[in-house]
Image (cartoon, rainbow, N blue to C red):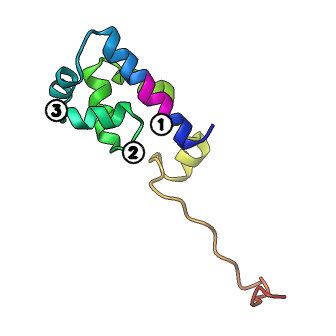
Amino acid sequence: MNAETSLQQVAQRLRQHRINRQLTQAELAEKAGVTKRTIENLESGKSTQFLTVLRTMEALDLLENIDVAIPEVPVSPLLKHARDGEQPQRVRKSKPTADTEWSWGDE
Protein backbone atom coordinates (compact mmCIF):
# COMPACT_ATOMS: atom_id res chain seq x y z
CA MET A 1 0.00 0.00 0.00
CA ASN A 2 1.34 3.43 -0.88
CA ALA A 3 0.63 6.89 0.55
CA GLU A 4 -1.94 7.81 -2.11
CA THR A 5 -3.95 4.63 -1.50
CA SER A 6 -3.80 5.20 2.25
CA LEU A 7 -5.02 8.79 1.78
CA GLN A 8 -8.01 7.53 -0.20
CA GLN A 9 -8.85 4.97 2.50
CA VAL A 10 -8.61 7.58 5.27
CA ALA A 11 -10.82 9.91 3.25
CA GLN A 12 -13.46 7.21 2.74
CA ARG A 13 -13.40 6.17 6.39
CA LEU A 14 -13.74 9.73 7.68
CA ARG A 15 -16.65 10.32 5.29
CA GLN A 16 -18.37 7.14 6.49
CA HIS A 17 -17.88 8.10 10.14
CA ARG A 18 -19.40 11.53 9.40
CA ILE A 19 -22.39 9.94 7.67
CA ASN A 20 -22.86 7.37 10.47
CA ARG A 21 -23.00 10.25 12.96
CA GLN A 22 -25.57 11.95 10.70
CA LEU A 23 -23.47 15.09 10.30
CA THR A 24 -23.41 17.23 7.20
CA GLN A 25 -20.07 18.40 5.86
CA ALA A 26 -20.91 21.89 7.10
CA GLU A 27 -21.69 20.62 10.61
CA LEU A 28 -18.48 18.62 10.76
CA ALA A 29 -16.50 21.59 9.47
CA GLU A 30 -17.92 23.81 12.21
CA LYS A 31 -17.18 21.19 14.85
CA ALA A 32 -13.63 20.71 13.58
CA GLY A 33 -12.95 24.43 13.18
CA VAL A 34 -12.30 24.24 9.45
CA THR A 35 -14.22 25.27 6.34
CA LYS A 36 -16.76 23.11 4.54
CA ARG A 37 -14.50 23.21 1.50
CA THR A 38 -11.69 21.71 3.61
CA ILE A 39 -13.94 18.79 4.59
CA GLU A 40 -14.95 18.35 0.94
CA ASN A 41 -11.27 18.22 -0.07
CA LEU A 42 -10.43 15.85 2.77
CA GLU A 43 -13.26 13.46 1.91
CA SER A 44 -12.35 13.49 -1.76
CA GLY A 45 -8.82 12.37 -0.92
CA LYS A 46 -7.04 15.60 -1.78
CA SER A 47 -3.88 16.38 0.08
CA THR A 48 -4.48 18.31 3.29
CA GLN A 49 -2.65 19.40 6.40
CA PHE A 50 -2.16 16.76 9.06
CA LEU A 51 -3.63 19.13 11.66
CA THR A 52 -6.85 19.20 9.64
CA VAL A 53 -7.03 15.39 9.75
CA LEU A 54 -6.46 15.44 13.52
CA ARG A 55 -9.12 18.13 14.08
CA THR A 56 -11.57 16.16 11.97
CA MET A 57 -10.80 12.97 13.88
CA GLU A 58 -11.30 14.86 17.14
CA ALA A 59 -14.66 16.21 15.96
CA LEU A 60 -15.70 12.63 15.12
CA ASP A 61 -14.44 11.29 18.50
CA LEU A 62 -11.78 9.23 16.72
CA LEU A 63 -8.63 10.89 18.03
CA GLU A 64 -8.09 8.26 20.71
CA ASN A 65 -7.55 5.78 17.85
CA ILE A 66 -4.38 7.55 16.72
CA ASP A 67 -2.35 5.17 18.90
CA VAL A 68 -3.39 2.29 16.64
CA ALA A 69 -2.05 4.05 13.55
CA ILE A 70 1.04 5.52 15.20
CA PRO A 71 1.93 3.51 18.31
CA GLU A 72 4.11 4.97 21.03
CA VAL A 73 7.74 3.96 20.59
CA PRO A 74 9.35 2.24 23.56
CA VAL A 75 12.86 3.47 24.33
CA SER A 76 15.54 0.85 24.64
CA PRO A 77 16.62 0.59 28.30
CA LEU A 78 20.25 0.38 27.19
CA LEU A 79 19.96 3.53 25.09
CA LYS A 80 18.14 5.34 27.88
CA HIS A 81 20.85 4.29 30.36
CA ALA A 82 23.61 5.48 28.02
CA ARG A 83 21.95 8.92 27.98
CA ASP A 84 21.80 9.21 31.78
CA GLY A 85 18.13 8.25 31.91
CA GLU A 86 16.98 10.70 29.23
CA GLN A 87 15.41 9.77 25.94
CA PRO A 88 17.54 10.55 22.88
CA GLN A 89 16.50 13.63 20.91
CA ARG A 90 18.43 12.99 17.68
CA VAL A 91 20.45 10.38 15.85
CA ARG A 92 24.21 10.69 15.65
CA LYS A 93 26.28 8.46 13.44
CA SER A 94 29.78 7.58 14.58
CA LYS A 95 32.55 9.38 12.73
CA PRO A 96 35.29 7.43 11.03
CA THR A 97 38.39 7.07 13.15
CA ALA A 98 41.91 8.06 12.15
CA ASP A 99 42.65 4.34 11.67
CA THR A 100 40.28 4.24 8.70
CA GLU A 101 41.96 4.67 5.33
CA TRP A 102 40.39 7.60 3.46
CA SER A 103 39.43 7.40 -0.22
CA TRP A 104 37.54 9.50 -2.75
CA GLY A 105 34.84 6.86 -3.05
CA ASP A 106 35.26 6.34 -6.80
CA GLU A 107 37.73 3.49 -6.44
Q: Which residue is mark 1?
A: 7
Q: Which circle's residue, 3 or 1, is located before the other in the chain?
A: 1
- What label sits on residue 107 in the rendered view? none
Residue at x-position 64% and y-position 69%:
94
Sequence-wise, the earlier of marks 2 and 1 is 1
**Which quadrant of the figure contains the N terminus?**
top right
Is residue 43 visible in the rendered image? The answer is yes
Q: Amino acid at mark 3?
A: Gly
- Label of residue 33 in the image: 3
Are dots 2 and 1 in contact, CB under 8 Å?
yes
Q: Earlier in the sequence, mark 2 or mark 3?
A: 3
Tell me residue 71's x, y (percent): 50, 31
Query: Residues in magenta?
Result: 7-12
Q: Is residue 8 left or right of residue 47?
A: right
- Residue 47 is tagged as 2
SS for callout 3 = loop
- Secondary structure, mark 1, is helix
Q: Amino acid at mark 1?
A: Leu
Most common SS among magenta residues: helix
Between 28 and 84, the residue placed more toward the observer is 28
- Where's residue 72, x and y in %? 48, 33
Question: Residue 46 at x, y = what percent?
Answer: 39, 41
User: Circle 2 — which element?
Assistant: loop
Kind of residue at badge 2: Ser
Residue at the spot x=77%, y=82% of the render?
A: 100
Mark 3 → mark 1, Cα distance in angstroms? 21 Å
Residue 29 appears at what percent x and percent y?
Answer: 20, 28
Place residue 56 in its image quadrant.
Answer: top left
Image depth: mark 3 or mark 1 in front: 1
Q: Nearer the viewer, residue 105 or 44?
A: 44
**Magenta span includes 9:** yes
